[in-house]
Amino acid sequence: MVCGHDSLLWRKSGNALYCIRIKRQDADVPRVNALIDRAYEIVDYGSYASLKTMMFQTRHSKCTDDRDRIYAMLGMLHDTDAELAIRPDYTKPSKEVYQELVLRYIDRQQQLSILLLCELRSGVPTLPSWVPNFAIPNTARPLLNMRATGDSLCNVESTGGDALQVAGLWVCTLRHLEILESTAERQYPRQDVIEAARRFASTHDMSSNYLDSTTLREAYCRTMCAGPVLDEILQSDGGGLVDASPAAKKFLDYAKDTCSGRSFFQTAMGHIGVGPRIAEKDDLLCVLLGCGSPMLLRAARDNSFRLVGECFVPGLMCNEAILGPLPGKFTRVSKLDETWNSYVGAFVDMWSGEARVEDPMLGVLPYGCERKVHEREKVRTIFVHENYLEGIHDRDLRLSKSALLDQGIVMEAFNLI
């Protein structure tokens, strides 16, 4: 980071912003807090950030030409994203540039993670719903390290024009929604989360069982912070703040980041979750092959759908919609790799304490295929197959549409417009 004649190492800039963000006082001016959060987002991804991450980080940056939301990043691309072979072409309109990026990303990566940046907006659409509008900042932060369909291989067909056909499963429809963030500027930034938690806890038996055999209390905690679990907030008594302990504040910081710009929902089948602010009753909750988060779809004309946005739903975040629930003795955890400042997933046998990378619901790898640690990015594992995409791929062939069909699991086709 350079300012005039002074400079500071990027990592030290990140450390300083982290301290400012964590130690700030709750009574600070909300707009100052927002600027601190905005600055911290830019340095919060270690030494490597993907193209889609950088585009999220710079969403508030000024830009006179919307095509430069993509083109300005090309000189900073990591090897994986550099393979997209994007070339600046200012004869193309922004819509074509954005749509071409999405199609190239899907074709090269064989996954749909770029769709996690999509947010349906009110008014007349200017882009297909499956193309993120990089010119307009998203209202919510993307969810990270989600595994709703594991390392599944996407199945996509570009049907021409503005349509894209994807494969997945419909789970259920939304029944009840509540926006988690007030429109008024809060002096205390966690207050919306606290009030929402108290409303929910006051009308539900938090000790009852949830769909994934945990308690509703634990499921609610995981929902409000998209993973990390601390339950101090779930006291339903009136009065002041729920708890002033460091653990409660940490939970509330996670929850504030997760809930900002989102709605809380309940489904017809009893799931709870957080999703886009613009979600509506009767939206479809689905999982899509190659997509890390469950997605909301909205019925449109001619058996087509508009992509509303991503969700976090306990009981659907670990391949359960496709393969069924994990065996009772297994649970999935995320651990921080401090060397790469990135989280890696593993399945832990609660009886023996043994951790494994492989999903216990999956069988053996296909003949000629093995799983290895990536040569440069040690937190990644890749699948090496002698007859597939020059031998290396980070998608699991056991979770392809054809392999699942061999197991009697039939994927549905969703035509996105």
Image: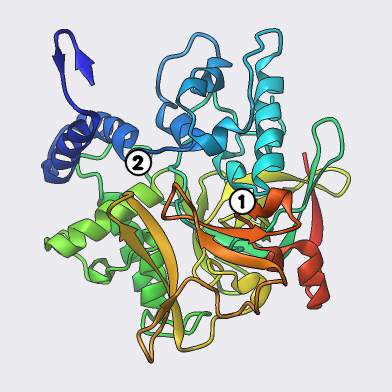
Q: Position of residue 408 (x, y in %)?
A: 81, 77
Q: In which quarter of the image is the C terminus?
A: top right
Q: In which quarter of the image is residue 81?
A: top right
Could you tell whether 1 is left or right of 282 in the image? left
User: Which mark lies nearer to you, 1 or 2?
Assistant: 2
For mark 2, does the 10 Å Cα neighbourhood hold few (<14), some (14 to 19), or many (20 or more) residues?
Answer: some
Instruction: Give how far apart the Cα atoms at labels 1 and 2 are.
Output: 33 Å
Q: How crowded is mark 1: few (under 14 residues within 10 Å), some or many (20 or more)?
A: many
Residue at x 82% of width, y 71% of height: 405
Q: In the rendered image, which quarter is residue 157 located in?
A: top right
Disc 1: which residue:
280
Amino acid type at mark 2: Tyr
Left or right placement of residue 244 versus residue 238 in this view: left
- Above/below status of 233 relative to 347: above
In this orientation, which residue lies closer to the viewer: 158 or 138?
158
Residue depicted at x 72% and y 21%: 96
**Residue shown at 62%/14% (left/top)?**
88
The amino acid at mark 1 is: Glu
From what the image shows, is residue 115 above or below residue 255? above
User: How far from the left and from the top, in percent, is residue 129?
Assistant: 69, 37
| Side (left or right) of 149 relative to 253 | right
Res. 368 visible in picture: yes
- Tag 1–tag 2 contact (CB < 8 Å): no
Tell me residue 229's x, y (percent). 32, 68
Residue 147 can be seen, yes or no? no
Outermost residue on the bottom side: it is 351
Q: In which quarter of the image is the N terminus?
A: top left
Instruction: Give whichever of discs 1 and 2 has the lower sequence position.
Output: 2
Q: In terms of secondary structure, where does tag 1 sit?
A: loop
Where is mark 2, residue-wise? 45
